[in-house]
């Protein structure tokens, strides 16, 4: 599987408005400026509804800004076609969603294989890698289980394994340890940290968990659609 | 991203899928029955035409509209390439046996001209030569005076003979009206079989007599109120080289037409073409009629696909979020639709076949006979199935459009 270089990501005066012009207009982001160099571990905190998930969606090209620019390595990517952005997501972004979002008709291993299959990774390699990832998140022996047969914590770990499947340069996680006990939380964080270091990947984590935030080297605090605090540890 | 987990996904909403397949199967079964039975009947009639012993028919507007038929027959026979010309008069008369009378369809023919115009199937049903006395019908006709002696011979069909207990050697009284005392006594000199017919025995005649006898009996020999020497048609047989050559047959038709500009002269080639054309129109009509059912079936399929897209909204959103291309997702939706349509169409073809088989086995009379003639043309059935699957792609496209228009972040909510 080819590995693309990890991009430097830049948000410039990014505004995201939902229902623009309508009676229920919501300004989820209000002119955010942000640069995330390769290999950085960033935690994002803030109250509910402050725009954290919107920020992750824009960083991961799931959404396009209403105004402003999203750049990867200085190239504007926020307004690229759906197809081009899908390709960039597939090759370069790993998502760990708050609600896991596993496909209910696929087994744990098939869920992990899904991004590799889309990238046309040969069957043998993707099976081997999926099994390896499931083992790393502590789910050996659970490869054939369907999501409804897994506990919340197990589903979350499958979601983590899936996010790592294509060896992304940018990992975006929304409360990635919310369903895990402290032991599994530490194991997953160690795995993410190792991936970040091995690949020099960027890791952006929305979390309220101090244990998770403590591992990050940069801490963003958001309020009302804006980054109100941006602290880098030495 | 096709193939994977698709079977499990399809099993998810089994009832919807079964209903969609059933709707399409019902919609497909109808044209299968109509087209196969209609096509079979047409093909049978076409085969009858192509197997007829004559190739050209002279006809006229109105009942018994050809006059001077003996004279015209002689003129036709003088054209090179003509092997037989058989004038035929068909009239309903009354036949009386010792047990009573009954109306029958009688045909008057010139015996040695009639037999050569029979096709291979029909000729086996008649005795040869026809035992009707004067083979040329010249004696009684007597140059249009009808003053010669008649033989008073008659052949009866085997169904009539069986129904009325008539056998060779017995006598039969034939009368133009339902009054035995006005009839003439005929000798039954033979019987003939009735060829299998389509849609009932309406075309079968029961008695065969010399042409001049029937003309004289029914008043079509001539008189102040009717045209002389009248018949309905003159059937013309050509030599083998002409009969099998459409161009030469058309030339011969033109020669016959030149003799009778005021009569209709058609070759069976033309009639076959007209029948084929009519059959094509009918097939189109059947398919158009069935398109209503097909539209309903496909509308149902589109609704099922849309319902599934709605139900799978989040799964589709997840796939898109992971970077799986819209084309791949669209391919899966369209594939699902095409699979359902193919299953429905196949079930419809099988269902239509079974319906026709059931009609052929368990119904009676004309419906059964028509069903037994059904032809399942693989080309037409293939086109039908391909059409259904093609239209299902449209249904899939509608569902795909809905699936891919929704913003990913909204689909994930």
Image (cartoon, helix red, strand yellow):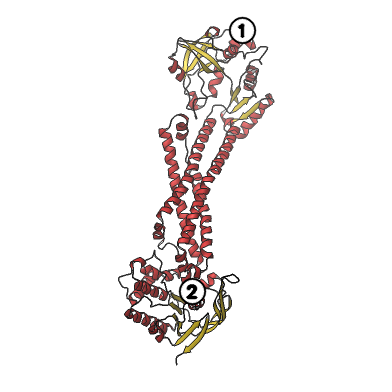
Q: Position of residue B125 (x, y in %)?
A: 47, 22
Which mark is nearer the camera, 1 or 2?
A: 2
- In the picture, measured across the screen, residue B240 lies left or right of residue B2, that is right
Q: Let me know if marks 1 and 2 both belong to one chain.
A: no
Label 2 marks a residue whose chain is A
Q: Which residue is mark 1?
A: B147
Disc 1 and disc 2 in contact, CB within 8 angstroms:
no
- Front residue (pair B282, B9): B9
Instruction: Reply above or below: A139 against B215.
Output: below
Secondary structure type for disc 1: loop
Rounded to the nearest whole Å, what is the CA distance between mark 1 and mark 2? 106 Å
Q: Quadrant of the C terminus of chain A?
A: bottom left
Name the spot of residue B169 as percent of width and height, x first: 45, 10
The relative height of residue B295 versus residue A51 in the rendered view (above or below) is above
Q: In the depicted view, which residue is nearer to us: A220 or A92? A: A220
Q: Furthest residue to the front?
A: A23
Q: Residues within 10 Å of mark 1 (few under 14, many from 20)?
A: few
**Residue at numbered disc 2:** A89
Whether residue A129 is visible to the viewer of this picture, yes or no, is no
- Mark 2 secondary-structure assignment: helix
Horizontal side of residue A21 vs B399, given as left or right: right
User: Dot 2: few (<14), some (14–19), or many (≥20) neighbours within 10 Å?
Assistant: many
Horizontal arrangement in the rendering, residue A145 relative to residue B348 (left or right) = left
Q: Residue at x 44, y 80 (%)?
A: A205
Observer-nearest of B13 and A72? B13
Give me the chain letter of mark 1.
B
Position in image of residue A2 (x %, y %): 45, 76
Q: Is residue B239 left or right of residue B17?
A: right
Q: Position of residue B264 (x, y in %)?
A: 65, 27
């Amino acid at each position: 599987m080819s590995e693309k270089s990890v991009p430097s990501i830049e948000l410039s005066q990014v505004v995201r408005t939902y229902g623009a012009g309508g009676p229920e207009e919501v300004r989820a982001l209000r002119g955010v400026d942000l640069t995330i160099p390769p290999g950085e571990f960033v935690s994002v905190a803030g109250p509910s509804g402050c725009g954290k998930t919107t920020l992750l969606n824009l960083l991961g090209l799931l959404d396009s800004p209403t105004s402003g620019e999203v750049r990867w390595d200085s190239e504007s990517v926020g307004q690229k076609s759906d197809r081009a952005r899908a390709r960039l997501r597939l090759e370069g972004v790993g998502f760990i969603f708050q609600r896991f979002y596993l496909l209910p008709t696929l087994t744990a291993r098939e869920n992990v294989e899904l991004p590799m299959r889309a990238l046309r990774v040969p069957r043998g390699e993707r099976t081997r890698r999926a099994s390896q990832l499931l083992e790393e998140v502590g789910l050996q022996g659970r490869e054939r289980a369907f999501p409804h047969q897994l506990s919340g914590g197990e589903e979350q770990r499958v979601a983590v394994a899936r996010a790592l499947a294509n060896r992304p340069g940018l990992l975006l996680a929304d409360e990635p340890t919310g369903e895990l006990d402290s032991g599994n939380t530490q194991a997953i964080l160690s795995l993410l940290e190792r991936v970040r270091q091995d690949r020099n990947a960027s890791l952006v984590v929305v979390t309220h968990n101090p244990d998770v935030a403590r591992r990050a080297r940069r801490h963003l605090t958001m309020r009302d659609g804006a980054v109100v605090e941006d602290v880098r540890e030495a | 991203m096709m193939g994977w987990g698709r079977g499990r996904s399809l099993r998810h909403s089994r009832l919807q899928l079964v209903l969609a397949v059933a709707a399409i199967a019902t919609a497909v079964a109808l044209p299968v029955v109509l087209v196969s039975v209609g096509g079979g009947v047409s093909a049978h009639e076409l085969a009858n035409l192509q197997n007829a012993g004559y190739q050209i028919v002279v006809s006229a507007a109105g009942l018994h509209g050809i006059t001077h038929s003996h004279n015209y027959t002689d003129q036709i026979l003088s054209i090179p390439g003509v092997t037989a010309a058989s004038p035929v008069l068909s009239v309903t008369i009354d036949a009386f046996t010792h047990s009573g009378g009954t109306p029958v369809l009688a045909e008057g023919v010139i015996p040695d001209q009639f037999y050569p115009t029979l096709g291979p199937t029909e000729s086996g049903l008649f005795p040869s030569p026809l035992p009707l006395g004067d083979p040329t019908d010249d004696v009684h006709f007597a140059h249009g005076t009808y003053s010669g002696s008649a033989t008073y011979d008659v052949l009866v069909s085997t169904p009539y003979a069986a129904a009325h207990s008539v056998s060779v050697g017995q006598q039969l009284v034939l009368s133009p009206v339902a009054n035995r005392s006005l009839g003439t006594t005929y000798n039954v000199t033979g019987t003939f079989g009735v060829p299998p017919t389509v849609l009932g025995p309406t075309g079968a005649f029961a008695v065969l007599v010399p042409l001049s006898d029937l003309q004289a009996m029914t008043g079509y020999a001539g008189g102040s109120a009717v045209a002389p020497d009248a018949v309905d048609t003159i059937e013309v047989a050509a030599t083998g080289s002409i009969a099998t050559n459409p161009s030469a047959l058309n030339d011969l038709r033109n020669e016959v037409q030149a003799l009778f500009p005021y009569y209709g002269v058609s070759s069976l080639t033309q009639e076959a073409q007209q029948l084929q054309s009519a059959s094509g129109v009918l097939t189109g009509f059947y398919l158009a009629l069935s398109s209503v059912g097909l539209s309903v079936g496909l509308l149902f399929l589109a609704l099922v696909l849309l319902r599934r897209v709605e139900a799978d909204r989040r799964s589709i959103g997840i796939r898109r979020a992971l970077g799986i291309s819209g084309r791949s997702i669209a391919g899966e939706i369209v594939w699902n639709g095409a699979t359902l349509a193919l299953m429905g169409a196949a079930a419809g073809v099988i269902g239509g076949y079974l319906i026709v088989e059931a009609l052929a086995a368990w119904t009676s009379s004309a419906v059964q006979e028509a069903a037994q003639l059904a032809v399942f043309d693989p080309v037409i059935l293939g086109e039908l199935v391909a059409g259904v699957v093609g239209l299902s792609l449209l249904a899939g496209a509608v569902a795909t459009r809905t699936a891919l228009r929704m913003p990913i972040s909204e689909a994930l909510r």
